[in-house]
Amino acid sequence: MIYRPVPARLPVPAGLGRLLVLITVFVCAACGLVYELELVALASYLIGDSVTQASVVLSVMVFAMGVGSLLAKRLRRRAALGFAAVEALLALVGGLSAMALYACFAWYGRAWPALVVFSLVIGVLIGAEVPLLMTLIQRVRRQDAGGAVADLFAADYVGALVGGLAFPFLLLPMLGQLTGALVTGAINAVAGGALVLAVFRGDLSARARRTVTAANALVLALLALCSALTGPFERAARHAVYGGDVRVAVRTELQEIVLTGGGRGGRPLALFLNGRLRAAGESSRYQEALVRPATAGPHRRVLVLGGGDGLAVREVLRRPGVAAVTVVEPDAAVVRLARTDPGLRRLNGDAYTDPRVAVAHADPFAWLRRAAADEAPFDVEVCDLPGPDGPGGAKLYSQEFYGLAARRLAPGGRLVVHAGRVSGNAHDFWTVDATLRSVGLTTEAYRAGAAGEEWGFLLAGRAEEDAPGRGAERGGGPPPVGLPEASAAGARSVVRPPGAAEPPSTLMRPRYDE
């Protein structure tokens, strides 16, 4: 038996009722896309590998939307009440999704199961919206199915556009991840409840109207309460992740910056970027191992890509004969903290007060691409970058990136890359090695640190007579770059295993975490 909705007797004119339904479609679509982007962004911050997280969220949600559309068929006879229930539940689940995902990461150390569950539930609820709204718009005024579908999807797609643009340009910078999701949930609840109670209240009994009103009021109250508690919640979650002595916690457009310790009698100062330890205590073993082998040769002009904390810059400035250091750091907040925080200034030796240091706030890839060919090349290039599995990280470990870096390298110059753990993730490490060699550089692999705290590096260079990119043409590249001052930097050479024949990683074919 085919269900055919009967036009309702509405408290508003049919034209106005139809407009209100389409406005609700627009708002719900915008909210749905914000939930989707919220999950992708937060999962990328917490778990890394943004491509995988986006693929999981999108695929699970699209599948769940199909399931939700099928389940909504059972609600069409009571479409108004069904739609009110779906929107109230979606507002609650979507609004709390970011907070729940962060809680799972902070207290249980695993955000992946929560990501899948929330993607599934939100997708089912979003999928149920359109069939119910289709029924409601036909209740306002009967029209051919094709025309109704065109109207609904037009409003839906425009709403998705607005939501997709509002998330990165409005919600995220102004409200942050948690409050942005909660505000979106509140808008969702108001839109769904208002449509049903204002336009389709005649389809509800008095008891159903009271239930819808109470349910939406409860949802709004819970979202408001959680919004008021976001500050204490974030502090408690950070303490669960970093310990109880968090001194600075800043969320920028690019990452989360956390400073812990550094007080009298407490833990040594530690710097975390997106949950990853970047500096700890007074130890400089990582920076020594990164910088000293590369600066054993000519090092008059040095380029530091990343390294906004100033620790690698401090190590460069310790070398005699350094005339100029250029730091390219995309996140101005990291440099600002390195300039102003007493503990971090003590750790980096006030490197940014040195007149030889110049800072450019730009994406390293874009900066290298824009660098003028007639500018003086660099004797040393230090890639102090977070790793290929971070947000946008694969681009900074690609063949194209190293090709641009090699173009700015002086004859006989050296380039050093932090490439992760040699033993912990050999595939990624040797992929970085293959990518460097693919642009005509010869590499030397080495490691530094002790058990449990070990780093892998690649020192690359080309012979003095080589022009950029000539090594690959000659076949085999320039002579081995060598590993000077290994004992002084605590570095130990690593021999490439016989089976390490990884293909290079490119922008079109990133090969990390395969």
Image: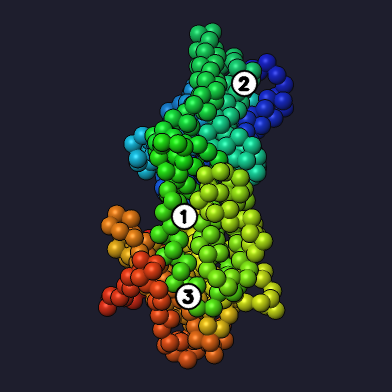
Q: Earlier in the sequence, mark 2 or mark 1?
A: 2
> Looking at the rendered structure, which numbered label has been put on residue 296?
3
Q: Give the Cα distance between marks 3 and 1.
A: 30 Å
Q: Amino acid at mark 3?
A: Ala
Picture quadrant where residue 448 is located: bottom left
Circle nearer the viewer, 2 or 1: 1
Q: Looking at the image, is 316 positioned above or below residue 344?
A: below
* Nearest the eye: 436 or 316: 316
Write the residue at 66% across / 71% down: 371
Residue at 72 percent of width and 25 percent of height: 16
Residue at the disc numbered 1: 390
Cβ–Cβ under 8 Å for marks 3 and 1: no
Query: Going by the image, does 452 lie left or right of 98?
Result: left
Q: Is residue 485 left or right of residue 17?
A: left
Q: Which is nearer the eye, 325 or 176?
A: 325
In terms of depth relative to the viewer, which is nearer, 506 or 494?
494
How many other residues sit within 10 Å of disc 3, few (<14), some (14-19) or many (≥20)?
Answer: some
Q: CA distance from mark 2 to mark 1?
A: 42 Å
Q: Amino acid at mark 1?
A: Gly
Tell me, yes or no, whether the two marked residues, 2 and 1, touch with CB atoms within 8 Å.
no
Task: Report how far apart the C-alphas of labels 2 and 3 lie in the structure.
Answer: 70 Å
- Residue 99 in the image: state x and y as whole percent: 46, 32
Residue identifier under label 2: 194
Query: Which image quadrant for residue 120?
Result: top left
Residue at 61% across, 49% down: 339
- Between disc 3 and disc 1, the foreground one is 3
280 in relation to 38, above or below: below
In the image, residue 149 sits, relative to residue 368, either above or below, namely above
